[in-house]
Amino acid sequence: MMRRALATDWFGPLALIVAASVGITIFAPSFLSPFNIQVLLLAAAVNVVVAMSQMVIIAVGQMNLAIGAIGGLAAISFAGLMQVWSFPPVLAAAAALGLGVTAGLLNGALIASTGISAFIITLASLSIFKGADLGITWRSPFTTSPPP
């Protein structure tokens, strides 16, 4: 059983995460507090969603470099719609999701209609979407952090 687990590709990263968690807990016992675990899981959830979307594209033999920029544009739109235009959260989430789907469909349509490699199309759209991110926010956060 142990030999079979050692042969898998997930065992090394899992062992590293467990070892790091034990090491950090020794120096900072509050690391395993329920609040900190919640924060870690929430932070990991975003990365998991991005990784799963990239997994689908890699499964068909392509690469999408714009996924992070599209996700950032959707997140900025979500926050901006709520803060600047006072949209309700559900409507802002639907609009941000629609924007992300539209951006992805645009990439897919360009790839399918032109025959240009997905790597090239998504590299170009990465710059466009990242530029839109910076243009919308003027390179500053929507809100400032509360003072400590």
Image (spheres, helix red, strand yellow):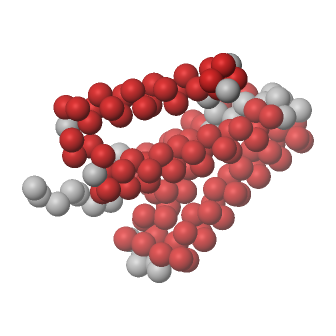
**x and y percentages locating residue 83 in the rendered image:** 37, 71
Quarter of the picture containing the N terminus is top right
Q: Nearer the viewer, residue 50 or 65?
A: 50
Q: In the shown orientation, is residue 138 left or right of residue 75?
A: left
Q: Residue furthest front?
A: 1
Q: Nearer the viewer, residue 76 or 23?
A: 23
Q: In the shown orientation, is residue 78 left or right of residue 36?
A: right
Q: Identify the residue at horizontal 35%, vertical 46% (top origin).
A: 139
Q: Which of 136 and 65 is in front in this view?
A: 65
**x and y percentages locating residue 75 in the rendered image:** 49, 56
Q: In the shown orientation, is residue 1 left or right of residue 28?
A: right
Q: Identify the residue at horizontal 54%, vertical 56% (top origin).
A: 74
**x and y percentages locating residue 116 in the rendered image:** 83, 30
Q: In the shown orientation, is residue 134 left or right of residue 57?
A: left
Quarter of the picture containing the C terminus is bottom left
Whether residue 51 is situated above or below residue 1 in the rendered picture: below
Q: Identify the residue at horizontal 41%, vertical 78% (top origin).
A: 86
**x and y percentages locating residue 144 in the rendered image:** 23, 57
Q: Identify the residue at horizontal 45%, vertical 25% (top origin).
A: 16
